[in-house]
Image (spheres, helix red, strand yellow):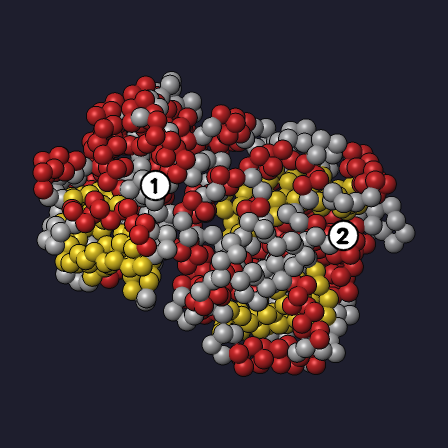
Amino acid sequence: MDLVPALEEPLKKVLGPATAKVMAEHLGLHTVGDLLHHYPRRYEERGQLTHLADLPLDEHATVVAQVADARLLTFSSPKAPRGKGQRLEVTITDGSGQLKLVFFGNGVHKPHKELLPGTRALFAGKVSVFNRRLQLAHPAYELLRGEDVSETVDTWAGALIPLYPATAKLESWKIAKAVQTVLPSAQEATDPLPESLRAGRGLVPLPEALLKIHRPHTKADIEDARSRLKWDEAFVLQVALARRRHADAQLPAVARKPKKDGLLTAFDAKLPFTLTEGQQKVSKEIFDDLATEHPMHRLLQGEVGSGKTMVALRAMLAVVDAGGQAAMLAPTEVLAQQHYRSITEMMGELAEVGMLGGVEHSTKVVLLTGSMGAAARREALLHLVTGEAGIVIGTHALIEDKVQFHDLGLVVVDEQHRFGVEQRDALRGKGKQPPHLLVMTATPIPRTVAMTVFGDLETSVLDQLPAGRSPIASHVVPAADKPHFLSRAWERVREEVSNGHQAYVVCPRIGDEDDDPKKSKKKPSPEDEAEKRPPLAVLDVADQLAKGPLQGLKVEVLHGRMPPDDKDAVMRRFAAGETDVLVATTVIEVGVNVPNATAMVIMDADRFGVSQLHQLRGRVGRGSAPGLCLLVTEMAEASPARQRLTAVASTLDGFELSRIDLEQRREGDVLGQAQSGARTSLRMLAVIDDEEIIAEAREEASAVVASDPDLEHLPGLRTALQALLDEEREQYLEKG
């Protein structure tokens, strides 16, 4: 069924080409329906003034205020005719504070006539600082009195003025006028919610919700509308995910039950430690899934170092025991090689099939990456197609057409957030029948995000650290305020090395890039200096450390643009203890395992995200000696970036940090296109705050899809799904 024509109408037909062009380019709004779903960010009450004291610096803001004072000043200017320039300074007030508006040149005449003391108006512009005071330069404004009173009141119908997410090219009130034009079309909006669900939860119909969100008369109207629109977003997304789960459950798969006294039994017998309770519980969930004749779809999330690789390896061995093959997909070559090394080491002679020293229950483990030589690659591909290799570990190279398996039974995807749904499915398409799927992530994800981003997967959580893992102490090093703290950081690195340990130094940049010619040559102000200078680079920092504070220590560099053999050689030397300090980019973020590395210094730590810092920190304290992580920053103590670092230093709980991370970022970053198979569709729903709605919507969606998988009786819901998923993604949902 097509979208309702009235809502599909292009905005250029309704609003004119100029406004429509700005809406399309700056706000991503193309149709009447898009504009109706562009909701106000907040509301002003008529007569109640915005707190000028709370204005956000460097953001586009809208305020309602009264003119307290207006002065036209003349100054000498070589650019002005007759050498005299004019500047209009207007002071506006809201009772809690004052704000200066400035207009220059030809822009002074109209506001000079209109912005007289006592005039009330809406003002919009970008908040900047001049002479240490906040100001708006050349703000757009809309008078709230005078001859246009009736028109203004009509435009802002009701007692509440909606303030929309706006841009410098299109102010909030112009968006409001455009919404006013298309609002009658809201009556034709088709309701995606089943009537029984809507009535059962006391939610208002969709046309009414759209009317109330854009033109509320009371705060209760806004509440009604928000409750309803949040449900729409949660429910439609959960239906998309439930349909995917349903489609997957219909697919046939080969049940893979581990052989009694096979490879897995032999592997478990040679383990030098006991599995944690968590590892045993999660392994049982996985083995139960593998034993069924429908493909497993499971997300395994666990803290850095909680032993996910061990759980994944045991699952792969069980599949090999049952006559299948297992493939592990890693996001980088460094990580693929690291997994290959650690898995072959853990397996020992069990990975040496057909070799001298190999044993009865053994298989071949092969590595497949894009940079391998032609001969090695040919050999690896041959071992896969004949079935001689039971386990393959590789990068995106595994997805290529040439790669064929004898009988692919299990796909393990490491660090899922680096891969889209499409890549996951391309590898799964290489099985004779759909293989089982295990997705791993070391980024702890709050429950609701897991339900929203990975809603097509069942979830297992490893939250226990294996015995013997050491605590990690984390500290913020304020390099600008207290330079001696940074000197002490390098002393601590030397102390760790003199105790027989090793250290990482992480930098945001490599340092061999050309300077970007597009970057402005304008000299930054001192307060911008820390933000505007280029991030510290591996090559520069390594050089400075080797000649300076870490002189005499063996310092090496590692980054993503090195040839693969060089990267591997550097990692081998570091793992063998031949290198004291490894200066690296985030290539070491996941999977790198050197138990003797106890210290990490992260330069420009404010340039990294919360989850990334948590991941990086997880590279130390992997042995019996305690770990130390120092977060170096030049940001001021009061800055949000510094507060973020303090949060990271204060807890080792990844779930707590992921909440902080999520609260500080836009929802869309979390629900990226590649992850959820849907456009960033959440405008009203907040995945942390609306946990209850998401959980209930998931249950309702599962029930709806179970009883009507093709949504034949719910045309409105089908329409909403079509709007959410473009055709290509819809196909992925169809085929699972």
User: Could you say which is closer to the camera, residue 585 or residue 436?
Assistant: 585
* Label 1 crowd (10 A; few <14 / some 14-19 / many >=20): few
Note whether residue 303 is visible: no
What residue lies at 81% left-to-right and 40% top-to-bottom?
377
Q: Which residue is mark 1?
A: 169
Q: Is residue 264 above or below residue 307?
A: above
Q: Reading the chain from its start, which is encountered first: label 2 or label 1?
A: 1
**Taking 131 as reference, is 588 left or right?**
right
User: Could you say which is closer to the camera, residue 640 or residue 395?
Assistant: 640
What residue lies at 22% left-to-right and 51% top-to-bottom?
63
Quadrant where the image shows the N terminus = top left
Mark 2 or 1, which is nearer the eye?
Answer: 1
Q: Is residue 24 above or below residue 114?
A: above
Place of residue 174 in the rendered image (x, y in percent of width and height, measured from the top left): 26, 37
Place of residue 564 in the rendered image (x, y in percent of width and height, measured from the top left): 76, 52
Place of residue 78 in the rendered image (x, y in percent of width and height, measured from the top left): 37, 55
Indicate the quadrant where residue 499 lies.
Answer: bottom right
**Taking 216 as reference, is 354 left or right?**
right
Label 1: which secondary element: loop
Place of residue 371 in the rendered image (x, y in percent of width and height, measured from the top left): 76, 45
- Given contact means CB atoms under 8 Å apart, are the residues at marks 2 and 1 in contact? no
Q: Amino acid at mark 1?
A: Lys
What residue lies at 52% left-to-right and 74% top-to-bottom?
479
Q: Which residue is mark 2?
A: 563
Indicate the quadrant where residue 320 lies.
Answer: top right
